[in-house]
Structures are given as C-alpha cells and as structure tokens.
C-alpha cells in the first residue's frame, strides 16, 4: 500500500476537524470535538496486476486537544494482505501530528512497519513564516532536509476549515494545495473536494448501528469526495493518485470511508465511537 495510508490519516484529520468549524471571520476556528473512532477495513475490489487477493484490517483514529492547546491526531492503521501466491504481509502505519489553531505550525511523526519491522519513519515540523512569507519544512527523519513551500499551501486543519466554509455557503467544489507530511514529508498534493448537499439531522439512523453511534443521530452530515493529484496534473484531466469518499458529521466523526488507490479499493466501516473531553487550557502553555 506504500504511503497511501498516510494520506488516509490526513483525510481522517480532514473529516475530524472540518465539521466543527463555524463560518467564522478571518482565520478563527473553534468547537472541535475530540473523539476516538475504530474502523474495520475490508477489500472492495482489486484489479488484475494489483498483487492483492485478500485484505483485512483495522484503523483507530483519535483526535484530542482544544482551540487553545492545538490539536493532536493519532492514527494506527493495520492491514493484513495476501498476494496472488498466498503470501501474507502485515503493514502497520502509525501517525501522530499536532497543529496549532492558526495553521502556523504543523508537527508530524509517522512510522510504517512491515511484518513487525520498521521500514520507514518521517519526523519533522512545518512553520508558516509571516515575514518574508512562505513555509519552512524541517525534516529530521529519514534524513535532515529543509524544504520551502509557498504560503498558499495548507495544513490539514486549515484545509478542513476552509472546505467547510465553502460547504456552508452551499458551494460544491473546493480545490487547494495541501501538505500533510505523507510521502516522507517531501510532497505537496493538489486536492479537489466535491461536497454533496447537506444531510439533515437523523441521517445517521439510516446507517448501520455502532457502539455509541447515537451521538450522531441529531447531527447533520455532508458526503465528501476528495481527490489527490500530482501538482499541475489536475488541470490536465489526469487520473487522481488517490481518492477517498466519506460522510462526516457536525461533531467531527467520519463514516462510510471508501478509499481508492487506483488498482484496488478498500472500505472502512465505523465500528465504535467514543467522544472525549477537550483538553483544558493552561496559562502560558508552550507547545
């Protein structure tokens, strides 16, 4: 699956923080709902040449923090894959990110294990500079490197809140460049989101029941389809590198994940949900 799951993590961040954004002035964000969600992963389709005959797994996503403390997102994505020869491989992706509410700092620590052996780790921090402008990304793993990105590039929480502002206006398309620390922290993707019409409260009752799922019953939701492109190719009718569709609710919970890697696709079904308390703000707390 390569670094695809890293982008899944970014999309879950997107789903987790966006719904709580109220159409607020300037760059103000508030009302995020910390929670822990568990998803069962199954293979939907694998085309010839994908090298996959079976795939199962589990994904656990957790959002903690608050407006004043910033937000931490942690995800563990474990899959067991069987190839055409019957060989089984276990991939374990672990991600942890922190972003301040203003979208000026974004820290990340992502590791990928294959058959219980770590094969990749990406650690670093991205800082948005107001003067002279632009974003400075300092990578410490897998090797020390400094990248400079245009100031227009967004981090995941930023991306989410701006997308929701578009949704609340009744618009259906939102496109922007996104840095989510996937692909060893070296890449910026062009993203395009299609936002379907709002589903009013009660929609969750039409979906399969899950543990503590009643927390979603009184909330509205939006179906979203989000595509990732190599920069520049989205203007050339190119096929996306990766696509994810999901339904997200006003409290930040995502359901009905469908993840398309091109030559195979997987589904994530929400199995349990736990709402968490926001982190209390501490005077002069430093991140």
Image (spheres, rainbow, N blue to C red):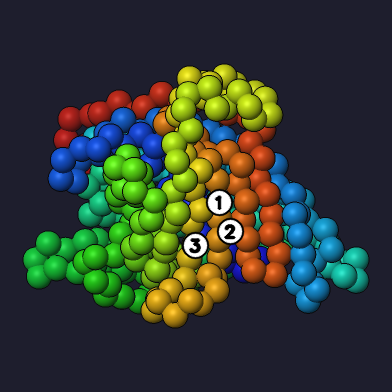
Q: Is mark 3 on a helix, strand or loop?
A: strand
Spatial CA distance of label 1 from label 3 is 9 Å
Q: Residues within 10 Å of mark 3 (few under 14, many from 20)?
A: many
Q: Which of 11 and 81 is in front in this view?
A: 11
Q: Is mark 1 on a helix, strand or loop?
A: strand
Residue annotated with mark 2? 5
Residue at screen point 29% across, 65% down? 153
| Closer to the eye: label 1 or 2 | 1
Residue 89 in sight in this render:
no
Q: Residues within 10 Å of mark 2 (few under 14, many from 20)?
A: many
Spatial CA distance of label 1 from label 2 is 14 Å
Residue annotated with mark 1? 245
Q: Position of residue 121 (x, y in %)?
A: 52, 65
The quadrant in which the N terminus is found is bottom right
Residue at screen point 68% across, 29% down? 208
Residue annotated with mark 3? 227
| Closer to the eye: label 2 or 3 | 3
Mark closest to the chain's N terminus, 2 or 3: 2
Q: Is mark 2 on a helix, strand or loop?
A: helix
Q: Where is residue 216 in the image (x, y as percent from the top left)?
A: 52, 24
Looking at the image, is 53 positioned above or below residue 24?
Answer: below
Left or right side of 32 for 52? right
Left or right side of 283 for 214? right
Residue at screen point 90% across, 71% down? 85
């Amino acid at each position: 699956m390569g670094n695809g799951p890293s982008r899944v993590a970014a999309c879950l961040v997107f789903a987790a923080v966006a719904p709580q954004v109220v159409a607020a002035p300037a760059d103000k964000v508030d009302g995020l709902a910390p929670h822990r969600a568990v998803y069962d992963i199954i293979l939907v389709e694998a085309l010839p040449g994908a090298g996959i005959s079976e795939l199962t797994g589990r994904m656990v996503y957790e959002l903690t923090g608050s407006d004043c403390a910033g937000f931490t997102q942690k995800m563990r994505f474990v899959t067991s894959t069987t190839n055409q020869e019957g060989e089984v491989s276990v991939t374990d992706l672990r991600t942890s990110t922190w972003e301040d509410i203003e979208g000026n700092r974004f820290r990340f620590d992502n590791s990928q294990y294959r058959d219980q052996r770590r094969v990749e780790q990406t650690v670093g921090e991205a800082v948005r500079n107001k003067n002279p402008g632009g974003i400075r990304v300092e990578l410490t793993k897998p090797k020390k490197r400094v990248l400079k990105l245009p100031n227009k590039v967004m981090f995941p929480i930023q991306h989410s809140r701006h997308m929701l502002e578009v949704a609340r206006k009744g618009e259906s398309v939102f496109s922007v460049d996104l840095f989510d620390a996937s692909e060893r922290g070296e890449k910026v993707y062009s993203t395009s989101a299609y936002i379907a019409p709002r589903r009013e409260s009660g929609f969750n009752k039409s979906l399969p029941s899950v543990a503590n799922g009643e927390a979603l019953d009184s909330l509205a939701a939006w179906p979203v389809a989000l595509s990732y492109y190599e920069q520049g190719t989205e203007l050339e009718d190119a096929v996306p590198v990766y696509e994810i569709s999901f339904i997200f609710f006003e409290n930040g919970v995502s359901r009905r994940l469908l993840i398309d890697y091109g030559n195979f696709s997987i589904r994530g079904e929400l199995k349990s949900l736990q709402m968490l308390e926001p982190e209390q703000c501490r005077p002069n707390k430093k991140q």
